[in-house]
Image: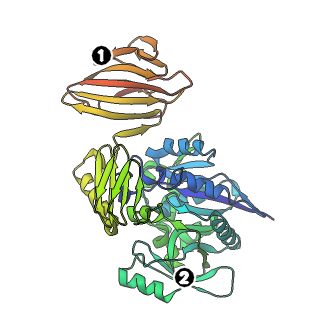
Amino acid sequence: MSISVQPVIMAGGSGTRLWPLSRAGFPKQFLTLSGSTSLFQQAADRLGRLGGAGIEVAPPVIVGNEEHRFLVLDQLREAGREPAAVLLEPVGRNTAPALTLAALQALEGGADPVLVVTPADQTVSDEAAFGAAMACAVQAAAEGAIVILGITPDRPETGYGYIRSEADGGATRSVLRFVEKPDAATAQRYLDAGGYYWNAGMFVLRASVWIAALERFRPDIAAACRAAWGVRGTDQRFVRPGKEEFGAVPAESVDYAVMEKCPGSDFAIRMVELDAGWNDLGAWEAVWQVAQKDASGNASVGDAIVSDSRNTLVHATSRLVSVVGLDDVIVVETPDAVLVADRERSQDVKQIVNQLGREQRGEHALHRKVHRPWGWYDSIDNGPRHQVKRIMVKPGASLSLQMHHHRAEHWIVVCGTAEVTNGDKVILLSENQSTYIPLGQTHRLANPGKVPLEIIEVQSGSYLGEDDIVRFDDTYGRK
């Protein structure tokens, strides 16, 4: 008899320690940091290849942020994969409520599949070893166990939690306890002693087992999630729990809510050792670890020149970046921000992000190039009373029907065909043609063609903020 497996990808993280490349509006799971596809796409591909003898794998359930819903669909489409559902959290409530939504979705219609739960921001270099470990975990979970993946440590890492485990003669290992992120001396002691594994944040268990364990250890989270699920709305592949109800769910991680309470209980918790070149790319130090390096330990991405330096990472996005005489340094350049950090302190980048948030600076959340469901815009110049944007609209897509109180706009078509609604007129513009949108005029930009449309937009007026938009009609449900 085959085992039904439901992959669940947790895609709601913000990736603050990988700023300035990762930002709230385009977090690390959607970035290409290792290989040729994004971390999220790699996770979807990895889970999609789990099927084998006796295992039937369904399309993935994605749990993510409302703001990233079109990024999720676009990247899955690029990877040639379709989701079973995209569960949209109106607010972040950590991983325990997120997994509960996925479990409730999986139990719809009376099914009780084995959930294979993984974050969207990890890399694995040995796919065969990953598949073998997961097959072992799926078999144990099908028999009722809660299974956690433990990573064989190769260094005294202080950025991960640990699992204390021992072999007891079975295909899986017993879990004795979970331990918090250690200091350097404690991490070295764990490495020397053996029997300690990094907690990968990957879990394999039946949907009903998760719900039963949550109801035992955190009935408040279980009840609040059920209330939010009971008033959910569905829009094609998107499933939205009740906003107010989900906002009342206590925020908690899977580990704190359930996993750490399982050892010694009547819930069987087991560990499968994973030695597959795993990395969670949680900080720039981890990116350096997995990158290709020269003889001096330097890694570079983009237009970079590294001279007389050692163990340094240079990530250039939009211009030439040159460094001389650096040891153990991270340099990350984007069009609107540059980070320079001690490689061993890359976990502390979140302090910069927190300060940007307190100061309400735009670099906290958005890049200069901002992705939208219809395409993207890049703010290439700005000054008093003017702003210049480069705008790309996907084939068949359109912006909202809108108007502005404080600015007028000039549009110049660079390539493609533009359908322009300007007041009560609708016109087509081709390459090198232009039009003017007066202040207060109702307007819309659409791409009726089969190739991307690119325009240059010149805004002029007394206020140029993105909140000066009055939408009358929007394909994507925005207000």
Give the image quarter of residue 74.
top right
Please give the label number shown on residue 438: 1
Q: Residues within 10 Å of mark 1 (few under 14, many from 20)?
A: some
How packed is label 2: few (under 14 Cα within 10 Å), some, or many (20 or more)? some
Q: Amino acid at mark 2?
A: Pro
Query: Is residue 23 at all visible to an observer of this figure?
Result: no
**Of 386 and 269, which appears nearest the observer?**
386
Separation of disc 2 and disc 1 at Cα? Answer: 67 Å
**Which residue is at a point 63% across and 66% down the rendered structure image?**
130
Note whether 20 is above or below 222 in the view shown.
above
What secondary structure is marked by label 2?
A: loop
Query: Which label number is shown at residue 350?
Result: none
Amino acid type, callout 1: Pro
Contact check, label 2 and label 1, Cβ < 8 Å: no
The picture places residue 469, in percent across and down from the top left corner, at 33, 29
> Which mark is drawn over residue 263?
2
**Element type at marker 1?**
loop
Q: Quadrant of residue 183?
A: bottom left
Image spot of residue 106 (x, y percent): 63, 57
- Classify residue 327 as left or right of residue 187: left
